[in-house]
Image: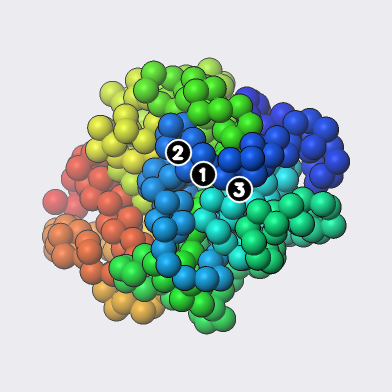
């Protein structure tokens, strides 16, 4: 499960936490280009069409521009390394094995936005990632790079590794801010967006670890080079976390836009012996299920969206015939119920109730009323929380109801 199988952008995975090795292999070149022409950083990311790898696929340059233009001193750049959702296991590898790409990406972000703080926000359950990042940051701090950065910025730059609460909800961006402000990681409604008011009310740029790890490569080799790594209109590469009933589960870095068929049946070695493909929980367990007729879908943000699903973090959890979809969904909803922060009663009670109903239905104890209650919760819960947790939970339940109605038939 935990092996890196294919490498385009990250030969640096072999380098570990040695800054010298990173620089000798061409690391630092992206930062040199950024320091030479800071005003070109954001346009280059725009041309490269780098998208947020934390789930939403939001154009990275827009966020950077908003943080750069926001008035206010003491700005923050935060690298989100909380990664706590079932099926996603990519950021921990970047942090553990190519920490300097992440730090360099964060430094370039600090330069583009004029930040005074760079925070590497890392899940303490990934102890090796925390340790390697601490080591990597100490090496950058002891190098001449920090003084070069501070000269370019015109003010000091503080770089810190901060352990997250280790909770799923702690990865949501406003919860990140709350934790860094010293509180429980409670999400809040937006606006204000982090770029307007974030840590200590200062403008704050929050990016996923993978998003930042791509940046030095883009600045080093150029936007055209990066775009060309993708297939068709899709740009760059993507880390896909492949798990479930496949021969070779693992982490695959492939061109953005690789088909689901190719990921599962070529790189993943196909289904386990004697198993037939049934469905994929796409982008993690909070999205719409893809089925056999979607095997040809290109795994990029826009193509997956066109199938009414989402690429999300790039997690693909493969399910075989004979596996109860309701059981899997019940497990994921139980995870969301446990992870709900409890601020919004509709989310805390809603996820709990969804999990209970699914459990009963899957156990053969469900009634027609239970099914009606499930369907009605799917109608009333969306949009009722401060953050996206409840919406994600409902999406996967609704998708299972639409895509596999037969599994619920015994209850009707
Ligand atoms: C419940 C919840 C948990 C989240 N957890 C993470 C996480 O662990 N890591 C992450 O990068 N983004 C997570 N996100 C998304 C962040 O809010 C944010 O969109 C992301 O860090 C932005 O980075 P990007 O633009 O580079 O994708 C989560 C969102 C929600 C609603």
Q: Earlier in the sequence, mark 3 or mark 1?
A: 1
Residue projecting furthest to the bottom: 183
Task: Identify the residue position indicated by label 3 in the image.
Answer: 108
SS under mark 1: helix
Q: Give the label, 3 or 1, closer to the camera.
A: 1
Q: Measured from the top left, where is residue 343 in percent x and y? A: 36, 79
**Distance from label 2 to label 3 (Cα)?**
13 Å
- Report the side of 12 relative to 120 (left or right): right
Residue 151 drawn above or below residue 164? above
Q: Measured from the top left, where is residue 326 in percent x and y? A: 33, 49
Quadrant assignment, res 195: bottom left
Q: Measured from the top left, where is residue 151 in percent x and y? A: 70, 57
Q: Which mark is residue 39?
A: 1
Query: From where the camera sits, is residue 34 visible?
Result: yes
Please tell me which residue is depicted at 73% across the width and 36% down the height of the picture.
27
The residue closer to the viewer here, 151 or 137, is: 151
The answer to whether the residue labelled 2 contacts the one labelled 3, judged by CB atoms less than 8 Å apart, is no
Number of other residues with Cα within 10 Å of mark 1, as a class: few under 14, some 14 to 19, many 20 or more? few
**Distance from label 2 to label 1 (Cα)?**
8 Å
Image quarter of the N terminus? top right
The residue closer to the viewer here, 258 or 267, is: 258
Disc 1 within 8 angstroms of ligand 1 (CB): no
- Report the side of 97 relative to 38 (left or right): right
Task: Identify the residue position indicated by label 2 in the image.
Answer: 43
Please tell me which residue is depicted at 22% across the width and 61% down the height of the picture.
382
The answer to whether the residue labelled 2 contacts the one labelled 1, judged by CB atoms less than 8 Å apart, is yes
Please tell me which residue is depicted at 50% across the width and 23% down the height of the picture.
224
């Amino acid at each position: 499960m935990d092996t890196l199988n294919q490498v385009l952008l990250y030969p640096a995975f072999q380098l570990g936490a040695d800054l010298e090795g990173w620089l000798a292999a061409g690391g630092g070149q992206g930062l040199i280009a950024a320091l030479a022409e800071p005003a070109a950083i954001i346009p280059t990311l725009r041309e490269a069409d780098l998208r947020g790898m934390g789930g939403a696929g939001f154009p990275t340059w827009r966020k950077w521009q908003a943080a750069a233009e926001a008035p206010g001193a003491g700005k923050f750049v935060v690298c989100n390394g909380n990664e706590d959702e079932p099926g996603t296991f990519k950021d921990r590898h970047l942090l553990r094995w190519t920490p300097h790409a992440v730090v360099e990406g964060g430094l370039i972000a600090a330069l583009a936005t004029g930040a005074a703080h760079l925070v590497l926000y890392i899940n303490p359950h990934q102890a090796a990632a925390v340790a390697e990042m601490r080591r990597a940051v100490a090496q950058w701090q002891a190098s001449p790079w920090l003084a070069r950065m501070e000269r370019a910025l015109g003010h000091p730059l503080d770089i810190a590794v901060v352990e997250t609460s280790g909770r799923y909800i702690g990865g949501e961006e406003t919860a990140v801010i709350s934790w860094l402000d010293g509180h429980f990681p409670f999400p809040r409604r937006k606006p204000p967006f982090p770029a307007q008011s974030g840590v200590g009310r200062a403008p704050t740029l929050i990016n996923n670890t993978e998003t930042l790890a791509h940046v030095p490569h883009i600045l080093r080799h150029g936007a055209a080079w990066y775009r060309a790594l993708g297939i068709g209109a899709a740009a760059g590469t993507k880390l896909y976390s492949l798990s479930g009933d496949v021969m070779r589960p693992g982490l695959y870095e492939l061109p953005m836009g690789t088909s689901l068929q190719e990921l599962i049946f070529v790189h993943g070695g196909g289904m386990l012996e004697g198993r037939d493909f049934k469905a994929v929980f796409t982008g993690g367990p909070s999205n719409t299920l893809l089925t056999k007729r979607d095997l040809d879908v290109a795994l990029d943000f826009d193509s997956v969206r066109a199938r009414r699903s989402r690429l999300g973090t790039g997690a693909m959890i493969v399910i075989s015939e004979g596996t109860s979809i309701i059981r899997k969904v019940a497990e994921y909803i139980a995870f969301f119920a446990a992870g709900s922060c409890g601020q919004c009663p509709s989310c805390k009670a809603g996820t709990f109730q969804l999990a209970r109903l699914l459990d009963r239905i899957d156990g053969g104890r469900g009634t027609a009323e239970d099914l009606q209650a499930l369907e009605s919760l799917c109608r009333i819960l969306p949009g009722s929380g401060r953050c996206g947790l409840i919406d994600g939970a409902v999406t996967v339940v609704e998708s299972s109801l639409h895509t596999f109605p037969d599994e619920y038939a015994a209850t009707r």
